[in-house]
Image (cartoon, grey):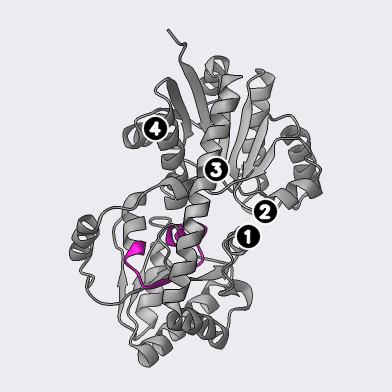
Amino acid sequence: MKKRKRVLISGYYGFNNSGDDAILKAIVKEFKCTSKNIDIVVLSKNPSSTQKIYDVKAINRFNIIDMLLEMRNIDMLISGGGSLLQDVTSTRSIIYYLFIIFLAKLFKKPVMIYANGIGPINKRLNRLLTRIILNKVDMITLRDSNSKETLKNIGVNIANIFVTADPVFTLEASDESRVKEIFIKEEIPYDKPLVGLAVREWKNSDKLKETLSKTLDFLSNSYGMRFLLIPMHYPEDLKISQEIKKNTKADCYILKNSYNVEDIMGIIKHLDMIIAMRLHSLIYAATQAVPMVGLIYDPKVEGFLDMINVDTRCNVDSLEIVDLCTQIEKVWRKRNEYNKLLTEVKYLLEKRAKDNIAMALELLKK
């Protein structure tokens, strides 16, 4: 009888962030679909919730004793996915994820950096630690080419570095009946054209809110557009969505409740297009071939748009109404063409996303 394998997954899990929850769901699903012989353990801020939602064992990501005990028994560490290795959020964040990798190598365990987005890593010490520790890992898969360039610039030069795609491309959206049920519950018209908006608080939030509110006014008056504001990180994104709705005369709706990954994907599938800051709202849109305008606040958003060859974008730090409206109008007028282009892209990225799990299983066999 085959010995069961044990995989520990480290990431930004248990924080009620739709993007990271989607990544975990995709990784767990792929492991369970491809092998019945693997036990999964997740490092989570909310272990009980993670265990219940994903049907895996979970331990507190800050409980060092439990982590050390688990490290002794695992057959592999998966670090990812998401933008774990960056120091824009904080130095503490990147040190935490590097420490988990360091611990696994201390216990002589195989480590795979799984579909990560790398950077920005600005501080000299953080770049040094990243180079030292990542040059010890066994395999790295990346969700965009910019991340590979970042690793090269830092000095990470292991042989097994591959550009794949975000794990979320392997997930499927909720069906139409479920989406209709949500729209009825949220009092959103189901049979009328809708444009999505997924934004987050940022350093210039007051100007951002004013620009977006006026943009919605213009688009509503010019094209009769209706808007659905989607808080991707719940409830953190709810406040800015409410303030935009309050400041615009456009016909606006907000998703007031928290929904799982498949539901959010299903909701986005129902949109005519989306305007978004949050990376995973753009990724969800790409999985459903929904035309998009990206609002760039972080290189990871730009990297994704580059990868899928979408040029309709604006920079959040220099956002102007005229520029944003020009990009939105371009997509709106040619949305059927964009839908066809994205349909081709999504099949390619789905295949690449499945390469992540294939490589993980190969590493686990060694």
| Picture disc at residue 303 | 1
Dot 4 or dot 1: first in sequence order is: 4
| Picture disc at residue 16 | none
Q: Residue at x 47, y 84 (%)?
A: 329
Q: In this rendering, would 254 be left or right of 67? A: left
Q: Which residues are magenta?
A: 268-286
Mark 4 vs mark 3: in front: 4
Q: Secondary structure at mark 3?
A: strand
Mark 4 vs mark 1: in front: 4
Q: Secondary structure at mark 2?
A: helix
Q: Where is the C terminus found, in terms of image quarters?
A: top right
Q: In this rendered view, identify the residue nearer to me: 179 or 34.
A: 34
Amino acid bearing label 3 = Gly
| Picture disc at residue 145 | 2
Q: Are marks 2 and 1 in contact (CB under 8 Å)?
A: yes
Q: CA distance from mark 4 to mark 1?
A: 29 Å
Q: CA distance from mark 4 to mark 2?
A: 28 Å
Q: Number of labelled discs?
A: 4
Magenta run includes residue 273: yes
Dot 1 or dot 3: first in sequence order is: 3
Bin the neighbour count of mark 3 within 10 Å (Cα to Cα): few under 14, some 14-19, many 20 and up: many
Q: Quadrant of residue 54?
A: top left
Q: CA distance from mark 2 to mark 3?
A: 15 Å
